[in-house]
Amino acid sequence: MAEALADREIVVSRVFDAPRETVFAAFTEKEHVENWWMPAGSQTHEWDAKPGGTWRYSMPAPDGAMYPFKVTFLEVNKPSKLVYDYASEGDPNPVRTNVSFDDQGGKTKVTLQLVFASIAAFEQAKAYGAIGGAAQSLKDLEKYVATL
């Protein structure tokens, strides 16, 4: 029997006090993404935010080690939808992330849907704080968008 999607997904939303074109740009343009997604000390190694394109970057751990990540862009439909796969470099089971940008009269509702490859992967991510991390990423984005 196939696993139900709800058993392996995280969905979080936030409303931003900014037009969706601005929020979409903050989510898809390198100069913006590096200002809210990546912690200090991170490095972008490759950036090509188009369908089939890749973003490779490394983030520092508390012990100083650098951890590589890879984002593969699948859909970039300005300004309403973004779909990408996200994983540690070399992980064969990326997280499919669907991002919608819904206009709400000059404000923008962003909804992140993270779909894990399996229930086990979802449970592991949940144990490591993925739900709070997804919500925190939108909070960080909100702080950044307020500066634009």
Image: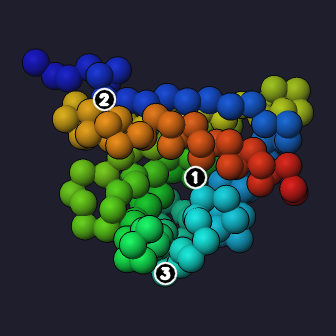
Count of numbered circles in the view: 3
| Residue, disc 1 | 76
**First along the sequence among labels 2 and 1:** 2
Near mark 2 (Cα within 10 A), the count class, few <14, some 14-19 or many ≥20, is some
Rendered-image quadrant of the N terminus: top left
| Number of the label disc, if any, that sits on residue 68 | none
Label 1 environment density (alpha carbons within 10 Å; few <14, some 14–19, many ≥20) = some
Task: Tell me which corner region of the image, top left, top right, bottom left or bottom right, holds residue 10.
Answer: top left
Q: Is residue 39 above or below residue 126?
A: below
Label 2 close to label 1 by CB (< 8 Å): no
Neighbor class of circle 3 (other Cα within 10 Å; few <14, some 14-19, many 20+) is few
Which residue in the structure is indicated by mark 3?
45
User: What residue sits 84% from the left and 33% below the top?
Assistant: 107
Residue farthest along the front direction in this orientation: 63
Residue drawn 29% across and 22% down? Answer: 7
Q: Quadrant of residue 17?
A: top right
In terms of secondary structure, where does tag 3 sit?
strand
How far, Cα to Cα, is label 2 from label 3?
A: 30 Å
Q: Which residue does the numbered mark 2 point to in the structure image?
A: 8
Callout 3 amino acid:
His
Report helix, strand or loop for mark 2. Answer: helix
Pointer 3 with pointer 1, Cβ within 8 A: no
Colouring chosen for the image of the structure = rainbow
Nearer to the camera, 45 or 147: 147
